[in-house]
Image (cartoon, grey):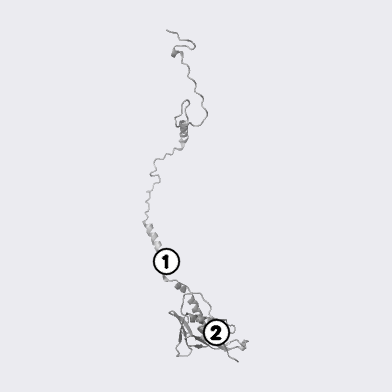
């Protein structure tokens, strides 16, 4: 049986997987169902080699670490006893691989952003390759935790809203204490308005009549200059003055006076 080797390359990273097809499960001649080893070569770093458990551990920590890094909440992934661990180290990323052999110190690699991105692309190609039928356990994407979301917002912005609310509440309380409270009975709505000039309800008709009588012109009298008489029916002419009686003049009507 021929040993197969599949290679996944990027600019600064090369991942090589070796194995044999699993004939018992009906795999093709170009499929790898039995993993014998893998190697990872990063530019400027020592080439790494491992078994299946190291490859699965690499998949479990690198992909979630990259997602948290893009989300702005980087944190360490991998237990102290796990074969692979990665955590932020200043502006770089520290990748640690622990050997299964006792008394062997872990190997640490410091990657920059470009090298980490190339490593993630190589691992994605490995997972999406249909020729690789290893049933590797890929990590399930998980949302960010609430504490991680709070860390994305600076502390000044997180406490600005509560401080502004407390300041506004204190200012409103101070203004309310400065406004004087009116004493009971100190306000009289009729004060300063004078005596009411409203007539009594029972005298409304008489007052209306007297006003009409005062405005009606008297027959035989001339209206005051500058005033216009109220419109009404035409007035009858005044009767002519009668002749003086005989007693007042000493004569009778129709006779001439006798000289004395």
What is the spatial separation of the Cα atoms under label 1 and label 2, in whole angstroms?
52 Å
Q: Residue 84 location in percent, x, y?
A: 48, 84
Q: Pointer 1: what residue?
A: 162
Q: In the rendered image, which quarter contains the C terminus?
A: top left
Residue furthest out toward the front? 11
Residue name at image x 55 percent, y 84 percent: 8
Establish if 144 lies above or below 58: above
Q: Quadrant of residue 161?
A: bottom left
Q: Which mark is residue 88?
A: none
Is residue 30 shown left or right of residue 195? right
* Viewer-side residue, 143 vs 200: 143
Q: Which one is earlier in the sequence, the residue at label 1 or at label 2?
A: 2
Q: Quadrant of residue 160?
A: bottom left
Dot 1, how many residues are within 10 Å of its Cα: few (below 14), some (14-19), or many (20+)?
few
* Viewer-side residue, 159 vs 233: 233
Residue furthest out toward the bottom? 1
Q: Pointer 2: what residue?
A: 8
Asked if labels 2 and 1 touch by Cβ distance under 8 angstroms, the answer is: no
Judged from the image, the secondary structure of the residue bearing numbered disc 1 is helix
Is residue 171 shown left or right of residue 42? left
* Viewer-side residue, 256 vs 29: 256
């Amino acid at each position: 049986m021929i040993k197969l080797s599949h290679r996944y390359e990027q600019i600064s990273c090369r991942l090589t997987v070796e194995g044999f097809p699993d004939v018992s499960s009906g795999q093709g001649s170009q499929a790898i169902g039995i993993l014998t080893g893998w190697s990872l070569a990063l530019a400027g770093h020592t080439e790494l080699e491992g078994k299946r458990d190291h490859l699965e551990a690499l998949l479990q920590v690198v992909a979630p670490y990259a997602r948290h890094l893009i989300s702005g909440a980087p944190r360490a992934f991998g237990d102290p006893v796990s074969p692979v661990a990665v955590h932020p180290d200043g502006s770089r990323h520290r990748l640690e691989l622990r050997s299964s052999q006792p008394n062997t110190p872990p190997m640490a690699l410091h990657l920059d952003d470009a090298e980490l991105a190339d490593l993630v692309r190589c691992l994605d190609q490995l997972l999406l390759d249909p020729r690789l039928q290893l049933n590797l356990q890929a990590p399930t994407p998980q949302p960010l935790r609430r504490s991680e979301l709070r860390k994305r917002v600076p502390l000044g912005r997180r406490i600005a809203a509560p401080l502004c609310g407390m300041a506004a509440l204190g200012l409103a309380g101070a203004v309310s204490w400065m406004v004087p409270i009116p004493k009971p009975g100190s306000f009289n709505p009729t004060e300063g308005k004078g005596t009411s000039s409203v007539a009594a309800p029972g005298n409304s008709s008489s007052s209306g009549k007297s006003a009409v009588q005062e405005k009606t012109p008297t027959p035989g009298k001339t209206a005051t200059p500058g005033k216009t008489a109220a419109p009404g029916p035409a007035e009858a002419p005044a009767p002519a003055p009668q002749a003086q009686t005989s007693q007042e003049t000493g004569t009778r009507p129709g006779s001439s006076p006798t000289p004395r």
